[in-house]
Every structure is written in structure tokens, then in C-alpha cells.
Image (tube, rainbow, N blue to C red):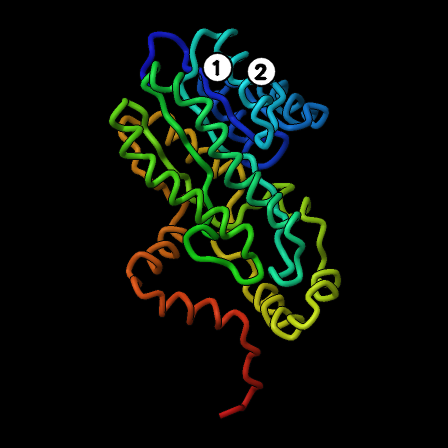
Amino acid sequence: MTPDTEPVVLITGCSSGIGLRTALATAGAGLTTVATMRDPDRSAGLREAAAEAGVEIDVRRLDVTDETSVADCVGAVVSAYGRLDALVNNAGIANTFPTVEMTDMATFRAGIEVNFLGVVAVTRAALPHLRAARGRVVTIGSSRGLIAQPFNEGYSAAKFAVEGFMESLAPVAAGVGVTVTMVEPGPVLETAFAANAGVTRASLLADAGPYAPVLEPYLDWVVRTGWPGAQTATEVAEVVLRALTEPDPPLRIPTGDWVREYAGRKFVDPEGREILALTRSWLARPEPDGAA
């Protein structure tokens, strides 16, 4: 991405977390930054952070589930700046838990709509302009799209779909001059993502029905292990900036050593036996001390 003028990047889901920090990073690096969100009334945090950093960010409305909103936003950006050099697909929701039998289909579909089809819709709208600029598509993936998380079928399925979509698109897009990259974070701190899910341990167990005896040891495992490999949203944003600016980024960029090792377990396990054993171990009750 080496235009004669400042590159223009459009980022989705910028009201908090990775999107907010990525907008600050790209603006600080001299890219013309268009930060979008479904509800611009939630932009106060971004605007304050931009003012503190001394950078300019163009905040616009974009609802990734509304094709008219997507088309209007992309069209307005190109009209305003004459070009679009890069897209960062970041918008997502955490409508996870409980397991699929205990979830209504409307909730399940809503997650797929935002976390997968929203990525498809915005990428589709941006591609004609990215072809013209020989630009880039950078998409925030997840370690949950590489190894699925128990009780997280909807989110994991959407992220797996994003992986397949981008891996399939990448060689096609490269043929017309567009680079496709997935940024693969693990657990991310300093984000409203988990809080937006609106869940607690008690509410999860109450909603789990017959699956509560399986869920409880998993929640205990989460408490015991914490969040290995956790990073800040700022650290992930630095990797996104790398994907936007380095000459030849790979298809996937793990955001740290933990994610790289975690992903490696999947790609050397073609039959899925090790992965299933790993994820099933998360649901097992620990043996009492002194047990044989």
C-alpha cells in the first residue's frame, strides 16, 4: 500500500477496544483514518482519545448488518477522499453462551450476521475501490476461529467462517492487486467486548439447563488458568498497523507467541484428535488431591 498521497483506511467497530486503538494507531502513523461504528453516539471515548493524542479521525456511522448503511458509508468515504486504500474488519459482538440447544435461533443468527456476514458485506462493498488502489483487507480473526471454544458455538462458527472466507478470497484478491491478511489475537484486555455480552457466572449456569454440570467445571478451568497470552487492545492494534504497512504481510499474523503456539496445535493435527482431547480436558473436573 504505497500511494502518492496519505492512504485512506476504513475501520469498523471503533467505539471501543481493538477498533478504537487501531484508529488511534493508524491516525498516528499518518493514515487518513475513517473510524466507523453502528452508533456514533458512542464515539465520545474515541474522540477524547484522539484529542489527547493530537490526531484527526473521521467518525462515521456504519452498521455492518445493513447493506444500505454499508454502501452509503463506503460511497461517502470515496466521495470525500477520492480513494479507499484499506479496510479493517473489526466489528463484532459477543453473543456467546449458552450452548446451542439452549439458545434461540434469532440470537444465533444475530451473531453470524455481525461476526461473519458483516465482514462479507463490508469487504464486498470495499473491493472495487481497493482494486483501484491496489489496497488491503485486514480482518481481525480470533484464536476461537482456529480452535473452537466450548459453549461458544456461535462465535467460534462465525470466526471459522471468516477464516475460510478470507483464505479463499486471498489468492483471488491477490490476482487483482489486493492483499488479504488475518490478524489473529488471543484474549484481549482493555475491551468492552466481554462486558457487552452481559453475562455472569450465575447467569451462565442458570441458562445452561441440563448442560450446567458440564459448564461448571469449564468455568472453574477458566478461573484456574486465567487468560494465558492475554494482550491489550493497543498491542493488537500495533499488529494491525503492521499488516497495513509492511511490504508483504502473510495471510495470518498471530499477535504474540502464545497465539502462534496455540494455532500451531491445530495445523499439525489433521484428524482433530489432539484438539478434541484438549478442548474436552477443559470440561473435566479435576481429580481430588491424592487420587490415583
Closer-to-camera residue (67/60): 67
Closer-to-camera residue (124/230): 124
Q: Residue furthest front?
A: 105
* For the residues bearing labels 1 and 2, Cβ distance under 8 angstroms: yes
Q: Is residue 168 above or below residue 218?
A: above
Q: Which residue is mark 2?
A: 58
Q: Give the image quarter of residue 46.
A: top right
Q: For the point 61% across and 53% down, which residue is it?
A: 96
Give the x, y percent position of residue 278: 43, 68
Does dot 2 land on a helix, a strand or a loop? strand
Give the x, y percent position of residue 282: 52, 69
Closer-to-camera residue (179/66): 66
Alpha carbon distance from label 1 to label 2: 8 Å
Give the x, y percent position of residue 241: 42, 29
10 Å neighbourhood of mark 2: few (<14), some, or many (≥20)?
Answer: some
Q: Is residue 36 above or below residue 120?
A: above
Q: Give the image quarter of residue 249.
A: top left
- Under mark 2, the amino acid is Asp
